Image (cartoon, helix red, strand yellow):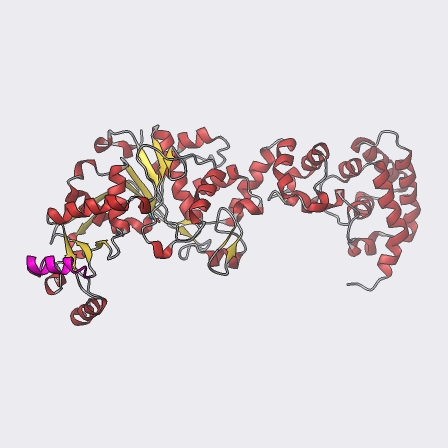
Amino acid sequence: MDSATNATNARPVRTRYAPSPTGFQHIGGLRTALYCYLFTRKMGGQFLLRIEDTDRSRYVPGAEEYIIESLSWLGIECDEGVHIGGPKGPYRQSDRKALYAEYVQRLLDNGWAYYAFDTPEELTAMREEYKTAENPSPQYNAFTRRHMRNSLTLSDEEVTTLLGEGVNHVVRFKIPADQTVVVNDVVRGEVVVNSNELDDKVLMKSDGMPTYHLANVVDDRLMGITHVIRGEEWLPSTPLHVLLYRAFGWEDEKPSFAHLPLLMKPDGKGKLSKRDGDRLGFPVFPLAWVHPLKEESSSGYREIGFLPEAFTNVLAFLGWNPGTEQEIFDNRADLVDAFSLERVSKSGAKFDYNKAKWFNEQYIKALTPAELAAKVRPFAPAEMADVSDERLTEICALLQERITLLPDVWEQGAYFFGMPQSYTRKVLKKKWKEDRKPHFQSLRDDLAALSDFSAEQVETTVKAMMERTGLGFGDVLQILRVMLVGVVSGPSIFEIAALLGQEETLKRMDYGFSNFDAILAEPAA
Ligand code: GLU
């Protein structure tokens, strides 16, 4: 049993993925969602999607839909959430505004929070005044608060007047002096902080909107969250959250925390960013997007042709491993079963695009050709789109072992849809010899005479020609390949010929007979 379910958490497991719609969620966010989901399924609990949009100035239209679509692409099903509702809704923080005011009031009433009326100029002046070499940017805290304009330093009448006049103000959390705050993190163990290191964070902004910290803690409590699983960048905020639980009197039912390691660049030096993907030639987003406000866009793993099952497997291994040699989890139930927060690593997880491609190849190979055909069809270029299911399945069967991304079938198999667009001159130059031409002509006639144009029959016929003429594999097969597909790589040329069919095979050979000399005579490109 996962020890994350220990003592304080005898309640049914409830987790949440709580993204902010301030941009397009990158694969780090999606990994958080996956880990929450896997852990919750393993524990037989409930997983919900909450949108944390209290910072309206950073809201990006479409970002919320993008999150929902990404989860659905990977089959990460939510039990409750902004898109499906549920008993603890609403699940979008901007729809819960009134509720936060009530909880801020509680903290004001019990002395854990206070009003602060300082203007931006006064805050700047404070930072200037208390700045030292050791402390270049002083915080609003137990020391400086005594010198500022807030409900701790002003008289009750003054405060009432200022509030009555509607003077701009915020509500700040009153961090208690010199207390030990302990965060028990499932991944990192015990993290101990002295409260003197923390500042009096704003809980309610001047526009009446709560800050992330307040809304996050209140919602986790009201939504019955037992395990907060999120990115490592939130670890420094967690002591504040623990104190908020204390301030509200909810300490006994505070959730367990699990902070997931950062996703790192392939070389391990720093956090993975869109720029790294652009530079190294891979997306860092699950789905493609176009920013509605900026001139920016990105491709996504779905659009470049990853299978969602393969990509799930990739994400699962970014910061976790099952502790066995097993790498492929082609069955969701097995992955759920193997998953545990205890095996999440502390150190940053390097994103390795080559490894990601390897996973996709393995999943592609495991499909039946008909399944693969159905999955590659949406990627069909217009001029190839009317291929029948049956023929596409045959093409897939032939190419399945060799492709990495779904659209590769169309690119690598383009020769099934039309004559080669070019011919490898190097091979022709070396192997298209005058004295061999009659042998290829006789091969053509033998192939024309076949009544069963199967790969086996084509192979037998080609081998008979080689025996008869003394020509070797390299001489015959490379020329035949160039004739049929233009290049010398690819699956079995006998299979290719059979799939092209007798008529098309002969047509392409004939084209070679009439054009190879002319191609060779052209100046090299
Ligand atoms: N809204 C925060 C984010 O965008 C959520 C952090 C948390 O899960 O507590 O990452």
Q: Does the magenta stretch include residue 125?
A: no
**Picture layout, residue 302 above or below residue 275:** above
Residue situated furthest front in the rendering: 165
Name the residue rendered at 44%, 29% in the picture. Answer: 334
Report which quarter residue 227 is drawn in.
Answer: top left
- Closest to the observer: 68 or 319? 68
Q: Which of 224 and 413 lies nearest the eye of the viewer? A: 224
Indicate left or right for 86 with 255 as reference. Answer: right
Q: Quadrant of the C terminus?
A: bottom right
Q: Nearer the viewer, residue 207 or 124?
A: 207
Residue 443's place in the image compared with 267, above or below, is above
Query: In this rendering, is residue 275 above or below 323?
Result: below
Q: Residue at x 34, y 32 (%)?
A: 46
Q: What stretch is highlighted in magenta?
A: 151-167
**Residue 290 appears at what percent x and percent y?**
51, 54
Q: Is residue 320 visible?
A: no
Q: In which quarter of the image is the N terminus?
A: top left
Q: Taking 400 as reference, is 468 left or right?
A: right
